[in-house]
Amino acid sequence: MSKDIVRKVLLVAASILNWIFSIGFIREVYHAMSAGGFIKYEDNINIDGSDFTPLANLAVAGINGMMILLVIGLSVLFATILILILAVLLRVTTIRKEDIVTESEVNFTKWFIIISSVLAFIAGILSTDIKLIWYVMGLSWQQPLFMLLIYYLPLKNRFKEE
């Protein structure tokens, strides 16, 4: 198998792995936000004849909000670390100094990264809800940025025009 086909296959595999994790994290955030919280609200909390229901429900709302924020933050962090690791591994293992890259491979890589990123964004919206578009963007910006900077640009620099 030639080096350009190996690079294309590994690029597709890295993109599929990123899709699985990004869309999985998006769905997890969606379920955390649509489930109504991690802790349930109470209807009647009486302590020594006094009604503490509003105070307890305020604490429940705060804890639920903090937990959702934690889920979102950790999801973005893990998705960023994962695609960063995949992009660096792809770059280190497939692009050598002596490699000569063809124009068709450079074009395939650029368009594949762009199209797969757009499709991941659309799949994230379709798998959740249009109201979560900012969260979907927060979990899908890593793919185009890191793959273009870490993988595509060094690959393009190896392209020698004849």
Image: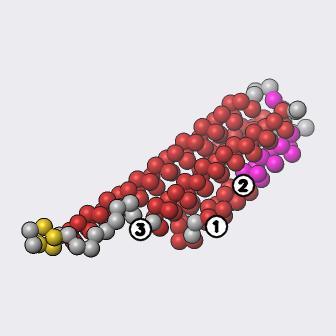
| Disc assigned to residue 114 | none
**Quick one: SS at disc 1?**
helix
Marks 3 and 1 sit apart, C-alpha to C-alpha, by: 21 Å
State the residue in front, 154 or 40.
Answer: 40
Amino acid type, label 3: Gly
The vertical placement of 7 against 120, above or below, is above
Mark 3 or mark 2, which has the lower sequence index?
A: 3
Q: Is residue 145 visible?
A: no
Q: Position of residue 59 (x, y in %)?
A: 26, 63
Residue highlighted by disc 1: 126
**Main secondary-structure element of the magenta-colored stretch:** helix
Q: Choose mark 1 or mark 2, whichever is in front.
A: 1
Is residue 158 rendered magenta in the image?
A: no
Marks 3 and 2 sit apart, C-alpha to C-alpha, by: 32 Å
Circles 1 and 2 in contact, beta carbons < 8 Å: no
The vertical placement of 52 against 120, above or below, is below
Q: Position of residue 85 (x, y in %)?
A: 60, 37
Which residue is at the far left? Answer: 48
- x 52%, y 45%: residue: 78
Q: Look at the image and give the residue range highlighted in magenta.
A: 99-113
The vertical placement of 91 against 112, above or below, is above
Marks 1 and 2 sit apart, C-alpha to C-alpha, by: 15 Å
| Disc assigned to residue 116 | 2
Residue highlighted by disc 3: 36
**Count of numbered badges drawn on the protein:** 3
**Quick one: SS at disc 3?**
loop
Q: Choose mark 3 or mark 1, whichever is in front.
A: 3
Query: For the N terminus, which image quadrant?
Result: top right
Mark 1 or mark 2, which has the lower sequence index?
A: 2
